[in-house]
Image (cartoon, rainbow, N blue to C red):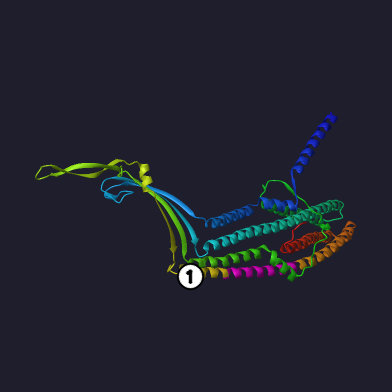
Amino acid sequence: MIKHIFGRISIFLGLVLTLISLDVNAQEKITLQMAVDRTLANNLTIKQAQINESLGLADLEQAKNNRLPSLNAGTQGGYNFGRSQVAGAFTYTSSTSLNVNGNAQLQFTLYQGGQLHNQIIQNKLLLDVSKGQTSKIKNDLILNVVTDYLQILTNQDLVDAAKQQVDIANQNLEKSNISFKVGNQTLADLSQAKAQVSTATLNLTTAQNQLDLSILVLKQYMEMDPNTPIIVERPDVSKLTDIKTVYDANEVVKTALTVNPDVLLAELQQKTYQQAIDLAKGYYYPTVSLYGGLASSYSNRLDTKLTGYSTVIQQIGITQITQEKVVSSYQQGVYGPYSAFEQIRDNFNQNIGLSIQIPIFNRFNARTAVRKARLNYESAQLNTQIAKNNLSKTIIQAVLDLSAAEKQYQSAQQTYDANKAALNVTKQRYDVGLVNSLDYNTAVTNFNKSENDMIEARYAVIFRSKIIDYYLGNTITL
């Protein structure tokens, strides 16, 4: 019987372990490169920017197509009542008539003040601006992903540290319980140990919540289902020996001005507004167009047509003496049916000509357009300089932050080592009763805080260094 029960327990434990293994295997491991690649492939903001690129390409293609001739055809038909002109004839009728007119017009712009050419150039620049905006969005998202990834790594280490702190607090509580029972500690000492466990547990809950939140943000960047379980790969930070912490701010600024998406985008927009000035000046010049057309018409009032002539002999009198008949002959028209097809064929006409439209006075619209284009260009120049100035300030601040982070990390490392040694000594003295629980808990608290500070300072150095890599246009990797 006992053997049978143990057999069932073994099967149950095997199933539990299998389910746990399947759950762990179901969690996908995400590396930094995978996170970046998925963000670039799935992020909706990027897709929206790519649609804007497609719109810019369509505008460019249309600007090129505007150099082609335009061909339009149309027809008009209707019943006319009262006195109206008969289609295809120079006559009028007062009865109801059905008139149908058809035409086709071809127009080709020969000259338009250079606007067609300048519009193509401007649309090319606008397409480059759209591409620059997409590039900027991608770069910003990469930086955001790296930032959040590093935050996840920081939070993971903080969770591990919090778990260790909970274990230490539980061990201390267990020892306090034993000491209290044998009378070596007071109730205050036991309460202090319990409070230490509660504090450590609260810190663990807070750290775990921050970790879950940072993972959720990463999923949002990758457009993943928030409920999809993932495991963020933790690279060995201790092996990151290529973290550069010393930079010349002026050299970084010089390089960044040539590769930074914000500056490049501002420069492209400046060129676009500069081209808009030439485009606006085109309104001062005449427009020369070549045109040609075809037309025909039909009317039900023209249902007959002249098909020929017949000779008609008619008596016009008699001679006075002989009384002989005097006759004359004339040609009389012969009419036959006039079909719609014949009318359209006979009324078919063509035209060709040259059209010149000269702007003489357009209520100063052209002058205002040129003036506004120049003001927009001046504004774009200022925006470009502002972008460069902001970049310079940001980089200088980033270099200073990196230097400060390196010093803070060294200080945090020293503080951690000192508190770790102090905790070991205090624990040894506490175990033999040379210090009370308050002193021991104070040493534990100081150690926990210094450990958290060291973890955060270590990742701060890595993050600050990667920020400089971002401004230099380097690929960010861990």
Residue 380 included in the magenta stretch of the image:
yes
- Pick whichever, 64 or 126, lies toward us: 64
Place of residue 466 in the rendered image (x, y in percent of width and height, measured from the top left): 75, 61
Please determine whether, in this image, residue 190 is positioned above or below residue 325: below
Please determine whether, in this image, residue 18 is positioned above or below residue 254: above
Report the amino acid beneath label 1: Arg
Magenta stretch: give its range.
378-401
- Pick whichever, 442 or 105, lies toward us: 105
Where's the C terminus, which quadrant?
bottom right
Place of residue 32 in the rendered image (x, y in percent of width and height, measured from the top left): 74, 53
- Residue at left offset 60%, top offset 70%: 381
Where's the N terminus, which quadrant?
top right
Furthest residue to the top? 1
Q: Is residue 369 left or right of residue 401?
A: left
Place of residue 144 in the rendered image (x, y in percent of width and height, measured from the top left): 69, 58
Q: Residues within 10 Å of mark 1 (few under 14, many from 20)?
A: some
Please determine whether, in this image, residue 168 is positioned above or below residue 364: above
Q: Visible in this render: residue 216? A: no
- Pick whichever, 192 or 343, lies toward us: 343
Furthest residue to the left? 321
Q: Visible in this render: residue 48? A: yes
Secondary structure of residue under mark 1: helix
Hey, which quadrant is residue 462 in on the image? bottom right
Place of residue 59 in the rendered image (x, y in percent of width and height, measured from the top left): 55, 56
Residue 384 included in the magenta stretch of the image:
yes
Q: Which residue is mark 1?
A: 367
